[in-house]
Amino acid sequence: MAKKKADKGESIQGYFRPIFQENPKLLKKRANDELFERWLKDHPGEKEVPLRVKQGLSNLKSVLRAKMKRRGRKRREEANGALAVAHTAPRAPRGLSLLETQIDDALQHARQLDPDGLDEIIRLLRTARNRVIVRVEGTA
């Protein structure tokens, strides 16, 4: 089998991929009869489509369909995101986001200085940061 691939110079998926680029509607079709007929015409020594070709085609269709879904989902999310931004309440004041960042920095600094000795301060800083986050989400 490896010798056949080397002689032809292409993989199963390498054979079918350009066909799907030419005609993406074939991806939506459940039946592969048209593709199998084309494969048999292009491979005159074969009388029936081998199982490995059928499996390779099935795998390729699955991968390409998944890519189409992801690409479509990204576009929908971008469109919905643009609409969501246009229709949402005003964003949280910039000062609250800055305050959250500063509390995070202070929390890291306290942990680096003395995590055991400053445990109460670390707890209070975490509480303060969490309350700021709740306030930011409440205004967004």
Image (cartoon, grey):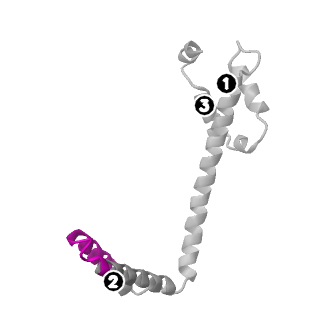
The secondary structure type at the circle numbered 3 is helix
User: For the residues marked 1 and 3, what is the alpha-carbon distance in whole angstroms?
Assistant: 11 Å
Instruction: For mark 1, give the secondary structure.
Output: helix
**What residue type is disc 2 on?**
Leu
Residue at numbered disc 3: 13
Image depth: mark 1 or mark 2 in front:
2
| Residue at 61 percent of width and 27 percent of height | 12
Which badge, 2 or 3, is on the more N-terminal residue?
Answer: 3
Amino acid under label 3? Gln
Figure check: 37 above or below 85:
above
Locate residue 105, reporting x and y percent. Answer: 28, 75
Alpha-carbon span between mark 2 and mark 3 = 54 Å
CA distance for labels 1 and 2 = 60 Å
Query: Which is in the foreground here, disc 1 or disc 3?
Result: 1
Mark yes or no: residue 22 visible: no
11 lies left or right of 40:
left
Q: Residues within 10 Å of mark 2 (few under 14, many from 20)?
A: some
Snapshot quadrant of residue 17 = top right
Tag shown at residue 52: 1
Residue wearing tag 2: 99
Determine which quarter of the picture holds residue 61. Answer: top right
Residue at left offset 58%, top offset 75%: 83
List x then y, in percent, for residue 38. Answer: 73, 26
Tell me residue 46's x, y (percent).
Answer: 72, 15
Which residues lie in the magenta part?
Answer: 98-120
Q: At 71% from the left edge and 24% from the top edge, which residue is drawn?
A: 51
Q: Is residue 106 magenta?
A: yes
Q: Is residue 71 visible?
A: yes
Residue 28 drawn at (x, y percent): 73, 45
